[in-house]
């Protein structure tokens, strides 16, 4: 019995992903009688993603030195920005999105957002 590489997604997971993405509604067996195509794409995507993640982790360790696993997770899986942070980013970085507001109005909104708790 050959053991698959740990980055190879199991066929059951590939089938699950197929069902999630199947917009036509056709049953899996009717669409693709052989899973080889989907398995190949999923495996290559997983391996590419793992390679990208490995390179990013190595670069982070090169920059900051040895990191405990908790800090590595923090750097590689940061929390998504809060709604407040997203709003501030829009106001601070893309004033074209607020053509109907004056600079004074944008500044007022910015100050109000900055005072809100996260």
Image (tube, helix red, strand yellow):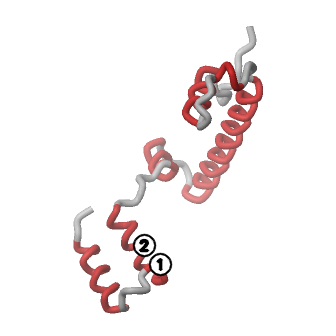
Disc 1 is placed on an element classified as: helix
Relative height, residue 69 to residue 94 (above, below)? above
Residue at 56 percent across and 53 percent down: it is 65
**Residue assigned mark 1:** 93
Labels 1 & 2 near each other (Cβ < 8 A): yes
Whole-number angstrom distance, CA of label 1 to CA of label 2: 6 Å
Res 32 quadrant in image = top right
Q: Which mark is residue 47?
A: none
Q: In which quadrant will I find the N terminus?
A: top right
Along the line of sight, the residue nearer the viewer: 45 or 58: 45
Where does the image place residue 63, in percent across and percent down from the top left? 59, 59
Where does the image place residue 44, in percent across and percent down from the top left? 73, 36
| Left or right placement of residue 75 versus residue 45 in this view | left
| Left or right placement of residue 96 versus residue 31 in this view | left
**Residue assigned mark 2:** 89
Residue at 75 percent across and 12 percent down: it is 2
Density class for disc 2 (Cα within 10 Å; few <14, some 14-19, many ≥20) is some
Along the line of sight, the residue nearer the viewer: 72 or 113: 113
Density class for disc 1 (Cα within 10 Å; few <14, some 14-19, many ≥20) is few
Res 85 quadrant in image = bottom left
């Amino acid at each position: 019995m050959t053991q698959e590489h740990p980055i190879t997604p199991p066929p059951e997971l590939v089938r699950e992903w197929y069902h999630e993405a199947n917009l036509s509604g056709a049953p899996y067996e009717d669409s693709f009688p052989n899973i080889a195509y989907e398995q190949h794409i999923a495996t290559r995507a997983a391996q590419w993603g793992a390679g990208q993640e490995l390179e990013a982790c190595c670069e982070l360790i090169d920059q900051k030195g040895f990191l405990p696993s908790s800090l590595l997770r923090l750097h590689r899986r940061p929390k998504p920005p809060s709604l407040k942070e997203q709003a501030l980013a829009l106001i601070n970085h893309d004033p074209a999105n607020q053509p109907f507001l004056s600079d004074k109005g944008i500044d007022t909104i910015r100050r109000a957002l900055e005072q809100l708790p996260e």
